Amino acid sequence: MPVTVPFSNPPRRPRRVRKLAPSLYRKLGSIAALLMLVLMAGCATPPPASDPDALADFKDTNDPLEPTNRVFYAVNNGLDMVILRPAAQAYVYLVPETVRAHTHNVLTNLGNPVQLINDILEAKPRRAGDTLMRLLVNTTIGVGGVFDVATGWGWPAHDSDAGMTLALWGLSDGPYLFLPILGPSNPRDGTGFGLDYAADPTSWIGVGTTVDILKYSKAGLGAIDARAEVLDSLDKITQQALDPYATIRSLYRQHRQSQIDDARSDNGATVPAWFPAPPAKPGAATP
Amino acid sequence: MNTRNEEHALMISSIRSGRRALLVASGLVWFAAAGTAVAGELSPDQATAFIDKTGKELMAAVNGSASADKKAAALTAIVDRAVDVTTIGRFCLGRFWRLATPQQQKEYLELFHRVLVLNITSKVGDYEGVTLTVQRAAPREDGIAVTTTVTRPNNAPNRVDWLVSSESGSPLVIDVIAEGTSLRLTQRNDYTAYLTHNNNDVQSLIDALKKQAAAPAG
């Protein structure tokens, strides 16, 4: 009956609001609690000015919240030991290599919309074009991202996220932060993580149990996939480093810097690999 | 730096003795030294050839059908031949090198070499099927960086840069930069953090390295 339609709709709307609002408040609450913790917790004492080398080291390390960071590192490590690492090990042990590779492809493809936004904001047309074509080709011909067809067709993958975008806009990284669950970061990259989350269509599209289950599965699978990728290297670091916390700090910084440098220097022509190359002009910049 | 200081001292002594000829001679020595530095400098082609050769040796060492022990021995020989372990070791100790006694420096370098070789050879089985292709070379502040692509089975190709310097007389690797992360810088940060949390006592690092050298990781 058409008369019932207007009455059947309104009750659904508040439900949607109720469903979204608490989760949003919970997230904001946890972020606020985290910030409070970080601010209240102890700061590292800089070495005295009489020891200029030590002071230079301290400035170079740029980790004024080191005592707090080390606590979070220990907590994360504990959680990793009992949850994520065994899960990743089981995943590697139980799931065949090909299935894992295709799962990784699907997850990467789901990240392409956010990557596209960042490529555009970074003013990198070639990279944006690559990402757009990767999204289109892999979603359709690659059957929902299961197969990475685009790489072979001349649209290779690259890294880009909001942290990198902010860096290319001239924002410096700020002091080192080791965030609970998220791990090594800094104010710039932490902000970038939030921006990427907000920009990701999959984080706000749709409601309902099925969508929630899919979302959590994606997050869980993403975490396990990412952890499985670094299973051996992280084991190696914890075994071989005298101070794994400092080693991870160093690796994270260097890796981010190299990602940013790669993005900054990637100014290639917007021509895919299969397109016949135009004759090189003398003196013209080659890709 | 040292040579410049020595030359400076020489100049002063020559002025004091009033022997103009010596002054000119010392000036010539200085120019000659600068000249050899330029002439002895490594060219990108030389560095590329060196990494190409070393890379082929590496692939031959780890990809054969030999036992793990034999492969480890071959790998150790290549490391000793192609890597400037002393320079890397000094770099990794950073500002603490000057704080260490000559005896500690000696002991540290020996241990550093042992631990480095152990870390490289302990997982020799994992390198099975590795291929290394030289891409290009570019000069950097302290040497020539030779970019290579390293591919392992079931892994995405990795970009690995080898920093080559001929400071010691012949071309030697002084750093390996994997996907933008410098191994020697990471190691230096590790040691610095460890020493900072152990009263800047070089002996504590030596003791820790002794443990590592005695019980190889994984």
Image (cartoon, coloured by chain):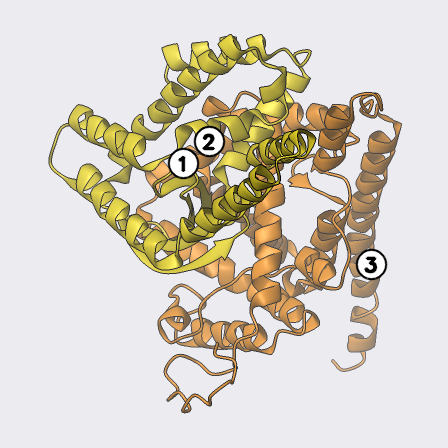
- Quick one: SS at disc 3? helix
Earlier along the polypeptide chain: callout 2 or callout 1?
2
Chain A, chosen colour in render:
orange
Residue A46: percent from the left, percent from the top? Answer: 82, 25
Q: What residue sits 66% from the left and 70% below the top?
A: A117
Residue position for label 3: A17
* Dot 1 amino acid type: Ser
Q: Chain of mark 2?
A: B
Asked whether residue A78 is in view, the answer is: no
Spatial CA span between label 2 and label 3: 63 Å
Which quadrant holds residue A261? bottom right
Q: Under tag 1, what secondary structure?
A: loop
Q: Most extreme residue toward the left, as rendered?
A: B65
Q: Chain of mark 3?
A: A
Whether labels 2 and 1 belong to a single chain: the reply is yes
Rounded to the nearest whole Å, what is the CA distance between mark 2 and mark 1?
9 Å
Other residues around mark 3 within 10 Å, as few (<14) / some (14–19) / many (≥20) = few
Q: Residues within 10 Å of mark 2 (few under 14, many from 20)?
A: some
Q: Is residue A123 left or right of residue A283?
A: right
**Residue wearing tag 2:** B87
